[in-house]
Amino acid sequence: MSYYVYWASLLRRPAKRMAIYTLLSGPVSPHRLCSHPFAMTLIFGTLFISLLLAVTVHAQSSFIGYPVGGSKVTSGKKFTVQVVRPNSIEGSTEVGLAIALLSCPDPAFPCAPPSAQLGSILYTGPFNPQLHEFGRFYENFTVTVPGGMAKGTAQLSTSRFHLIGAGPSPILEFNNLTLTVV
């Protein structure tokens, strides 16, 4: 079989035709790649699955419902922290929660992220959110600001550990907001 006959036989096969055309015509441009129906299905399928996974993970994320960022708390006094967990189709097993307050009174040195430093631990223990009005799952915790905490900016953080899915997969999530200690 001659070289020409070999290439001609490959060009008769539709699956090989695209690959050979690509090899002979140089680099693949995004326009030419996306014009192929299978490539479009693959690209949009990958984007859809990625978006779906991101939405699923975000739907499990808790947040601090109260106090709101910028609120004032008094050193040595009690205040309420509300931790909200959105309702989800996927099962979640709560393992534990930590609530902490980190003093950062000097604006030249911002607070460290909660994944690096928590500060004064105000609560550690179980997290058992209950269904309340408007279909929200949350739990309120009454905690005390440490008496010797410096006045000024402070970071309130929550660290929640839970298991997601049938596997299950472990998830450690952090939330924080800024308060003012007076």
Image (cartoon, rainbow, N blue to C red):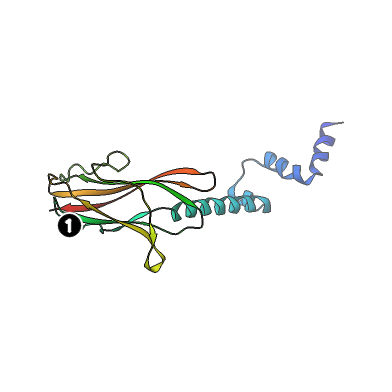
Outermost residue, bottom side: 134
Image x and y of residue 18, in percent: 72, 45
Image x and y of residue 69, in percent: 25, 57
**Front-most of residues 144 and 149:** 144
Q: Along the horizontal axis of the image, is 152 left or right of 43? A: left
Residue that carries the numbered disc 1 in the rendered image: 72
Q: Residue at x 29, y 43 (%)?
A: 113
Image x and y of residue 79, in percent: 21, 56
**Front-most of residues 181 and 110:** 181
Amino acid carrying label 1: it is: Lys
Outermost residue, right side: 1
Image x and y of residue 156, in percent: 25, 49
Q: Residue at x 43, y 44 (%)?
A: 171
Q: Is residue 66 above or below residue 145?
A: below
Secondary structure, mark 1, is strand
Dividing the picture into quarters, in which one does residue 85 lie? bottom left
Q: Along the horizontal axis of the image, is 89 left or right of 31? A: left
**Front-most of residues 29 and 155:** 155
Q: Decide: few, some or many residues near mark 1? Use Cα within 10 Å; few <14, some 14-19, many ≥20.
A: some
Q: Is residue 32 above or below residue 16?
A: below
Dividing the picture into quarters, in which one does residue 13 lie? top right
